[in-house]
């Protein structure tokens, strides 16, 4: 089964749960920015939760299904539609041959995940299908998808269970869905734990991080969210040896603006590690 890319969107890549076990060799882990949504989308279509899906950022692609397919969409709500009919999220969706999936305005979140039953047939590199753009590694030719690309999909585990009724919109959505009320809230709380150097920051900086607003700057990417706000300072200069960093590590460089390390983070870092996102 194949999918044809009509429009690629802003940044659409193939991602799974990342390249585990190779950071000690300097290999970036990569993987989905929102692993929970990727897992949910995969489970909905009968894939292993670690299977690769399309990670869609802000502006979604237009995709033509060359054969019937079973899909699910999870994560940020980018107004998905099939043949210009709105598509529900967090549900199994049976898509008819020649139907076109597209996306509209962002209603919530930043990234959405499209899983297709059977998974994307791309070669694994160091045990993962994830795309790492800086090294042109993994995914589909090591790059974001482009207009004219044809993505192959394996045989789905639910092939014999797909409903066969005709739908006027080119798709049929299952009646049941996964509830998101336990982790998707209008005013989410971001929880953190103290990092190894938290006590080395001034008391004013410790309070400022939790009491003052911070903004994600345009310099942010899959490597990390660069924040602007109150400048965070140490009690006294530190000389640190670079050591391993993890998803959600919050480092503070000399300019005092914290960086939240994400999926494409470096393997080691030498800036003070003030906090760690709780996951």
Image: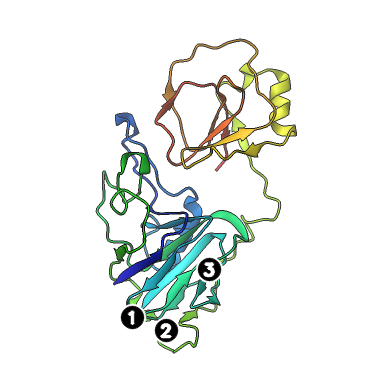
Q: CA distance from mark 2 to mark 3?
A: 21 Å
Q: Residue at x 47, y 51 (%)?
A: 35
Which image quarter: residue 54?
bottom left
State the residue in front, 152 or 18: 152
Question: Are the residues at dot 2 and dot 1 in contact (C-beta closer than 8 Å)?
Answer: no
Tag shown at residue 80 = 3
| Side of 156 relative to 251 (left or right) | left
Within-10-Å neighbours for mark 3: few <14, some 14–19, many 20+: many
Q: Position of residue 56 (x, y in %)?
A: 47, 57
Q: Secondary structure at mark 1?
A: helix
| Side of 142 relative to 266 (left or right) | left
Q: Residue at x 29, y 30 (%)?
A: 25
Q: Earlier in the sequence, mark 2 or mark 3?
A: 3
Q: Which residue is mark 2?
A: 163
Within-10-Å neighbours for mark 2: few <14, some 14–19, many 20+: few
Q: Position of residue 120 (x, y in %)?
A: 32, 61
Within-10-Å neighbours for mark 1: few <14, some 14–19, many 20+: few
Front position among marks 3 and 1: 3
Q: Position of residue 226 (x, y in %)?
A: 56, 34
């Amino acid at each position: 089964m194949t999918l044809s890319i009509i429009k690629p969107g802003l940044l659409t890549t193939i991602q799974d749960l990342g390249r585990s076990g190779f950071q000690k060799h300097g290999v970036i882990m990569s993987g989905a920015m929102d692993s929970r949504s990727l897992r949910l989308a995969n489970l909905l279509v009968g894939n292993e939760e670690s299977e690769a899906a399309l990670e869609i950022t802000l502006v979604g692609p237009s995709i033509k299904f060359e054969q019937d397919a079973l899909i699910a969409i999870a994560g940020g709500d980018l107004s998905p539609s099939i043949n210009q009919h709105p598509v529900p999220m967090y549900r199994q969706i049976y898509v008819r041959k020649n139907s076109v999936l597209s996306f509209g305005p962002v209603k919530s979140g930043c990234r959405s995940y499209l899983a297709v039953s059977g998974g994307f047939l791309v070669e694994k590199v160091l045990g993962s299908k994830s795309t790492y753009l800086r090294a042109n590694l993994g995914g589909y030719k090591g790059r974001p998808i482009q207009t004219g690309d044809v993505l192959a999909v394996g045989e789905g585990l639910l092939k014999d269970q797909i409903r066969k009724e005709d739908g006027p919109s080119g798709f049929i959505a299952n009646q049941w869905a996964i509830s998101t009320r336990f982790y998707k809230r209008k005013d989410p709380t971001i929880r953190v734990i103290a990092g190894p150097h938290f006590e080395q920051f001034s008391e004013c900086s410790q309070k400022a991080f939790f009491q003052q607003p911070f903004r994600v700057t345009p310099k942010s990417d899959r490597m990390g969210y660069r924040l602007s706000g109150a400048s965070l300072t140490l009690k006294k200069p530190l000389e640190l040896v670079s050591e391993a960093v993890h998803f959600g590590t919050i480092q503070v460089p000399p300019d005092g603006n914290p960086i939240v390390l994400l999926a494409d983070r470096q393997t080691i870092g030498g800036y003070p590690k003030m906090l760690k996102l709780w996951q």
